[in-house]
Structure formats: structure tokens, C-alpha cells
Image (cartoon, rainbow, N blue to C red):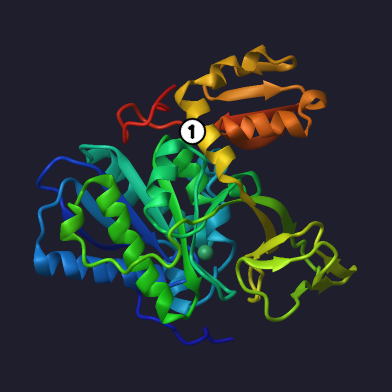
Amino acid sequence: MPDPPAQFPSFPRLLGSYGGDTAGPLVIGIGGMHGNEPAGVFALQDVLHNLHDRRPAFRGTLLALTGNRAALARGCRYIDEDFNRLWVAERLQEARERHAELTSEEREQRELLTAIEAALAQRQGPAVFLDLHTTSAEGQPFVVIGDSLPNRRFASGLQAPVILGLEEQLEGTLLNYLSEQGHVVIGFEGGQHASPDAVQNHIAAIWSVLTTAGCLRPQDAPEKTPPEQPVCPVVEIRYHHLIQAGDDFVMEPGFTNFQPVRRGQLLAHDRHGQIRAQESGQILMPLYQGQGADGFFLVRTVRWFWLRLAVWLRYLRLERLLPLLPGVRRHPDQATTLIVEPHIARWFVMEIFHLLGFRKKRHRAGKLLVSRRWHEPGAFEDGESNP
Ligand SMILES: [Zn+2]
């Protein structure tokens, strides 16, 4: 069968860069990790044009890269496998040593990783990554971060709801991989795939990250539109509907991001029957496209009291007391990881871990591993800069 017609011209891996004359942060913007999400690529091109036209003073470097080039050229989410699910250290190592044929996405990964590592090797300041996506459902933009104070600071400049806890649900994302190396990483979902607003939202997000990083003085960024919501909520993932092969998952029509749903409400169908909301909350990323394994998420707003409390507890470094809890001990090799006996990891213990920024969960040999994000020393004066 002939290939479907190309949707977009072939984008280069390196979209462009700006700055580099004065030491400062390295901001790496990545668009099109999913090939049917070109809005981030267009936004990065727009910001680079603007910077090269006006030539404002700039500390550090902005580097703009494309994600899945082959899928972008075809306008589909991916060619062989989801490019945003294969960023796992063991898998990278295995693909690096393998001489057998690589999948289309493994080839993309090699190239993208080479570009990222080359930029990191030359930088003269902390690195910040901005991973630009769009969703198949309609709705307002939102931010996805690992839960650390520097990540929260960058996210709060974006004037969009912040999603915590996605890394507990999705393994192998680029965001998780780069976060584990100690970088600030911001995932930004700019709106629906084809909506012109999505490009504008991404452009605003890039300027915001450049000013928060201190690359650009705020007055040198284009005029900001006033925020739609003066205070943006922080929401936590409560439920993730993962689709298995052959499920024939079909979302009920008409759901938008952050639409409230009631417990028991019909959300979707698959070959097992009806899929209803497990609890009341808001729906996020309902799947309205053929490719993808995440049917939908249910989220719930985190109250401001808990968010403020979490900030204070982390400034006080109370996480150092966690190994005093029964059944909790430090990981012998990883300073930011704790090993928890599963029988004591009841809900209230997990809530304490969440408050102190421990979120990532893995089960290994009958034990639960929780980790908190860390950042390089001196990266955006945060107080969490160890190990
Ligand atoms: Zn995406």
C-alpha cells in the first residue's frame, strides 16, 4: 500500500536556536513528540522568528527541537510505537547496544537524544525543558510537572491548571526521563490538536518559560494577554483508564478537558461493556483519536491549604524525617528514593509522601519505591537541590 500523503513538510531535527553569547540557562523546547501534534513546532518557529527579528538581550540559549519527525511528516501520533513511552533507562541502553533493526521511534530517539546530550554538554547554566503537546479533546490548556518546587514555580507562570501525579501513571515519558536527571521539565498541553488557539497558547508558554528562567527580561517578551483565571487550580490524577490491545475502546462523545463528571456516570464503552466514572471529579484527556493507550484520566483539585503546607514542609526539609516512620527506609544507592513496606503504605502514608514531594511509585521485589524529584545544585534556588 502506498504511504498516505504527507501532512506537513519534513521538519528538521534542529528547528533553530537563539542566544548563546551570554552565560545563562539552557532552555530546550521540544515540539511534536506526537506526530499529530504539530502546534508546538509551529510555536517554536514563531518564537525563534520573533527573537531573530527583534534581537533582545538574552542570557543563555533557547534551543528548539522536533520530536517524532517521521510521524510529523505523516500527521499521525506515531509510526511503530508511542514515542513518549519508550524513555526508560534500561530500554535506552538495550536499544543502544542492539544491532538488529530499530523501530522508527527508536531511530528518532537516538537522534533526539544525541541532540539533547550535545546541548547539555555545552551549556553554561541549568537546563529547562519544555515539552509541547496537544490533546484530541477540546478544552483549556494545562501543565504537567513532576512535583518539585522549581517545577511548580515555572508552572505557575503559565497561567493554566497544573496536573500532579501523571508520572505515577505513565512510564517511559520524556518528561520523566529528563526529570530523573535533575532537570526542570515542564509538559504543556496547549489545547486541541488542530485548534489555532493551541499554537498561540504554546507561544505564550514558551515566552513565559524564557522569562521565568531569567533568559529574557519580562519587558522584552511580547505583550502578555491577561490570564483567563487569576488563580489556576492544581489537580491530582485519581484514576487512569489504560486501554489493552483489542479492547475496542470508544469514548462517549462530547467530553472536554476538565469537564466535571459524577461517580457512576457513563464515560465510554469497550468489549467488556460500559465504563463508568469510579468517583466524582473532572475528566482529563478523553481519547478521541485512533492511536493511544490512555482512555481518560479522572482528576480532582488539590486544596490551596495542602499546597501551601507542602511548600513549608519542603522548605523545612521534613522529608529527612520520613525514614523514622515504621517500615520506611532509605534506598542504599539512591538519595531521593525510599523503600516502603507495602503493608504500611496505606492511604494516609501516601498522602504524607505526596505532601513532601514523593510521588513516583515502583514495585520491586515486594517493596514499594517512592522517589522525589531533585534538581542540580543552584538550579533556580530551590532548596531541593540534592542529592
Ligand atoms: Zn502528545
Q: Residue at the location (47% across, 21% down)? A: 316
Q: Alpha-carbon neighbours of circle 1 within 10 Å: few (<14), some, or many (≥20)? A: some
* Direction from residue 289 to residue 155 in the image, left or right: left
Identify the residue at the far right of this view. Answer: 272
51 shown above or below 95: below
Q: Residue at the location (19% across, 46% down)? A: 60
Relative depth, front residue between 93 and 301: 301
Q: Position of residue 231 (x, y in %)?
A: 46, 56
Q: Can residue 36 be seen by looking at this rendering?
A: no
Quarter in which the C terminus is drawn: top left
* Direction from residue 370 to residue 3 in the image, left or right: left
Q: Position of residue 331 (x, y in %)?
A: 60, 19
Element carrying mark 1: helix
Q: Position of residue 57 (x, y in %)?
A: 10, 53
Q: Residue at the location (58% across, 25% down)? A: 337
Q: Position of residue 110 (x, y in %)?
A: 42, 52
94 shown above or below 106: above
Using the rendered view, name the quadrant where residue 285 is placed. Answer: bottom right
* Residue topped by disc 1: 311
